Image (cartoon, rainbow, N blue to C red):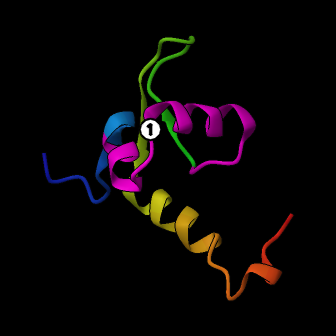
Amino acid sequence: MGEMPEQLLTEDDAAEFLRTSARTLERYRVSGTGPAFVKLSPGRSGPVRYLRADIFKWISDRRQQSTSSAAA
């Protein structure tokens, strides 16, 4: 089996990369405001993973030129 082109990050790895907490990422998932994620199995306790490319896209989508151009 070849290497995966996209690296799946655990919730903790994604939180560390973003310099936030896993709890914050959980709140983002509930509100639908965070990076896209992958749910590996159904149910509340199913593991969540993040594609590195989705995290970069989410960051890029939030770039601002000034505080006055920030979306509400």
Q: Nearer the viewer, residue 50 or 3?
A: 50
Residue 7 % position (x, y): 28, 52
Q: Position of residue 71 (x, y in %)?
A: 82, 69
Residue drawn 41% across the image and 22% down it: 47
**Compared to 71, does 2 lie above or below?**
above
Q: In this view, which residue lies farthest toward the right?
A: 72
Residue shown at 43%/62% (left/top)?
53
Quarter of the C terminus within the rendering: bottom right
Name above or below for residue 3 compared with residue 58. Answer: above
Residue at screen point 80% across, 82% down: 69
The amino acid on which the numbered mark 1 sits, given as a three-letter code, is: Ser
Tell me the quarter of the picture where residue 52 sits.
Answer: bottom left
Q: Residue at x 34, y 54 (%)?
A: 17
Q: Secondary structure at mark 1?
A: loop
Tell me: residue 72, above or below residue 16. below
The residue closer to the viewer here, 3 or 60, is 60
Residue 3, percent across and down? 16, 54
Which quarter of the rendered picture does the N terminus lie within?
top left
Q: Was residue 30 drawn as part of the magenta stretch in this picture?
A: yes
The residue at which mark 1 appears reads as 21
State the image quarter where residue 43 is shown.
top right
Left or right: 22, with 67 as reference point: left
Query: Does the magenta portion include 8?
Result: no
Residue 50 location, quadrant = top left
Span colored in magenta: 13-35
Q: Is residue 50 left or right of residue 6?
A: right
The residue positioned farthest toward the bottom in the image shown: 65
Majority SS type along the magenta span: helix
Residue 60 position, x and y percent, is: 56, 74
33 up-or-down from 67: above or below: above
Mark 1 neighbour class, 10 Å CA radius: few under 14, some 14 to 19, many 20 or more: some
- In the rendered picture of this protein, how many numbered marks are placed on residues? 1
